[in-house]
Image: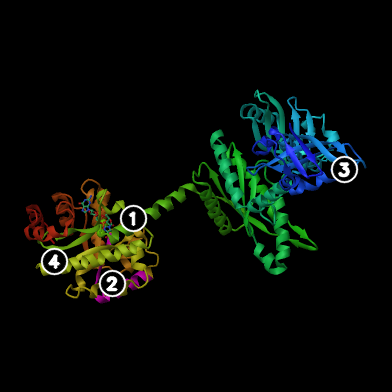
Amino acid sequence: MGLWNWDLRTGMVQGDDTLAQMFGDPPPGTERVPIEEWRSRTHPEDLLALDPPLIACLKGETEQFEVAQRIRHRDGHWIWGLWRGRVTERDAQGKCVALMGSFHDITERREAHERLQLAASVFTHAREGITITDTHGTIIEVNDTFTRITGYSREEAIGNNPRMLQSGRQGPDFYAAMWHSLTTDGHWTGEVWNRRKSGELFAEIITISAVRNLLGAVTHYVALFTDITSLKENERKLERIAHYDALTGLPNRVLLADRLQQAMARCQRRGHSLAVAFIDLDGFKAVNDLHGHEQGDGLLVALAQRLQSSLREGDTLSRMGGDEFVAVLSDLENTKDCEPVLERMLHAAADPVRLGDTLFQVSASIGVTLFPADGVEPDLLIRHADQAMYQAKQAGKNRYHLFDVEQDTAVKTQREEIARIRQALTAQEFVLYYQPKVNMRTGQVTGAEALIRWNHPERGLLAPAAFLPAMHNHAISIDVGDWVISTALRQMADWQAQGLDLPVSVNIDARHLQKEGFSLRLAALLAAQPQVPTSHLELEILETSALEDIALVSDIMRRCQAMGVRFALDDFGTGYSSLTYLKRLGAEVIKIDQSFVRDMQTDPDDLAIVRGVIGLAHAFHREVIAEGVETIAHGTALLRLGCEHAQGYGIARPMPASELPHWAQHWSPDRAWTAAVDATPR
Ligand code: C2E
Ligand code: MG
Ligand code: MG
């Protein structure tokens, strides 16, 4: 406590050493300073505070005064002081002329007070609701916002437990986790659904902190919470927009994908199946066009409800857009279990719907695929169901169609194979081998058959049986066929340049032959090798590959023959209408199929066929050639039957083009063949 005295007559004040120390002044000794100096160091906001009590004192109304003021310390900061003064001397008229008193430094007390005031004001005015409880969870204080949010007054809350707000939406586990976090970390934050006094539910985000004393023991819990109900509401709305169809309220494709994924996982765990049903309404577009979109929408909503109610619990119906829906029928112990549901959906869709005074009737086409039998990704499952739906439409609508997994894989494999073949064409992986054809009697090399091979980089040299079936009935067979013809023609030109003048036959796919513009393309290919006589090209038609339109084929053949190209009927005798072909198609050559030749010496039936074919050829004035001559004996037998032309392993295997000139130069027929001829009268 510093002491001072003030002489009003001189206007001077004097403080003691303690006061000087408090003010940061040098020790005063006996020195006095004018009162003005102290006043000038007083905080301007506090100056007037002194005046009323002082004036009362000076006037003689009071003997003492007491006032708190801030005064500037020498080094600039403010100190809060409590001035107390008392009159020590009066003049004759009783007017005060001298005072003395004390000065207390109350800075710390003031600051603590201010902090408290600030805290109180934060507490009161915070936009968060605040609850303070003791360690037993009993509420000892709440703020105004608490009341505003919960509807409970301060009086109602105090003494109560925050449990009063519980909605029952969170289970015991939730609160156990909260307490665990509070006791181990000292705080917890989370979202809670609580109930207002009015009974209304509200969502809050809440932070609870444990308050500890100096010894570290928990003394209180303080909870701050914000009402986030409207945020939650918005979140829900957004979630609805993102996951549900606005018109029907059904899950949309986003949510469907999610549900499907979950259902698939569940089925796999339990060893069950699920069905994905793609539903497309039949005749809906007409309703829209005739009655307008409003009626159309009404119909969609009504049908969506009906479809939904024909499902089992746990199934999902979603709208994909337009008049397309997808249902996921999950947990099928038996795949057949989905059938009654599908039937119910068909009925639901086909039942008439009354809107206003119009009666509408549509139906549904449903495509179904079953998982895990169809073991693909969710989006592919939906695509497969969509494909099957398309087939249901094609089969006459108002029905369901099951997706055929095996057929799909076959189609897919073919697609991949075709892609690989196309690549092989550009990479020039195909080559032609040539198998000589000879006259066994004269020893003349009469030609060669071009046989395609695939020089596969990984699988080695592939025979046609390994890749032709994949191209069957596909447009690529035409590109490959064109390549074969042009390559054979170029080879003939090459051989010609080397002095080997050899006719070549190529095998021709029926589809290729019947392709529009075949004769024109053939003419162009022939024109590209003008030195090769057109009569050197022979086309072997594979009889078995079913010529669809005999009149058309015969017409095409005639056009090609007009250019000089010759034809052979390949594999003769194996097809079911050989005689028709022989009669109606003007092929110059008949090739006896190797299957008859192979066993002609042991199987009398085959021998009869070979004999018959040779007889037919002679009767119809066609040339005849036998394929599959594997042994000398085969050749001898054929010669005896009057067939001189042959090809087969017994003569030569198919060989690369480069080997053929050498082979042709050195080949001579077996002695037995020439002898056989001599023995047989012709
Ligand atoms: P193909 O036209 O009947 O051809 C004769 C087939 O018999 C060839 O088989 C040939 O290698 C084989 N062969 C020849 N002599 C003998 C023999 O003495 N014994 C046995 N067991 N077989 C013999 P490859 O080359 O495997 O051709 C099979 C079939 O593929 C051909 O039958 C033909 O239908 C088709 N093909 C071959 N090349 C082409 C082509 O370039 N285009 C089309 N569209 N089909 C072709
Ligand atoms: Mg052939
Ligand atoms: Mg053949």
Kindly identify which numbered label has been placed on residue 420: 1
Count numbered badges in the picture. Answer: 4
Position of residue 86 measured from the top left corner of the image (x, y, whole percent):
84, 35
**Amino acid type, label 2:** Leu
Residue furthest front as drawn = 92
Residue that mark 4 sits on: 495
- Residue 44 located left or right of residue 61: left
Q: Picture quarter containing residue 219?
A: top right
Q: Earlier in the sequence, mark 4 or mark 1?
A: 1
* Marks 2 & 1, CB-CB < 8 Å contact: no
Q: Secondary structure at mark 4?
A: helix
**Amino acid type, label 4:** Trp
401, 138: nearer the viewer? 138
Q: Picture quarter containing residue 642?
A: bottom left
Position of residue 49 measured from the top left corner of the image (x, y, whole percent):
81, 45
Q: Secondary structure at mark 1?
A: helix
| Residue shown at 13% from the left, 66% from the top | 495
| Residue shown at 62% from the left, 27% from the top | 184
Kindly identify which numbered label has been placed on residue 522: 2
Q: Report the magenta residues as a range.
A: 552-570
Give the label, 2 or 1, closer to the camera: 1
Q: Secondary structure at mark 2?
A: helix
Whether residue 152 is situated above or below residue 211 in the rendered picture: below
**Amino acid type, label 3:** Leu
Q: Earlier in the sequence, mark 1 or mark 3?
A: 3
**Amino acid type, label 1:** Arg
Q: Earlier in the sequence, mark 2 or mark 1?
A: 1
- Residue 484 located left or right of residue 412: left
71, 410: nearer the viewer? 71
Residue that mark 3 sits on: 58
| Residue shown at 72% from the left, 67% from the top | 291
Residue 566 sits inside the magenta stretch: yes
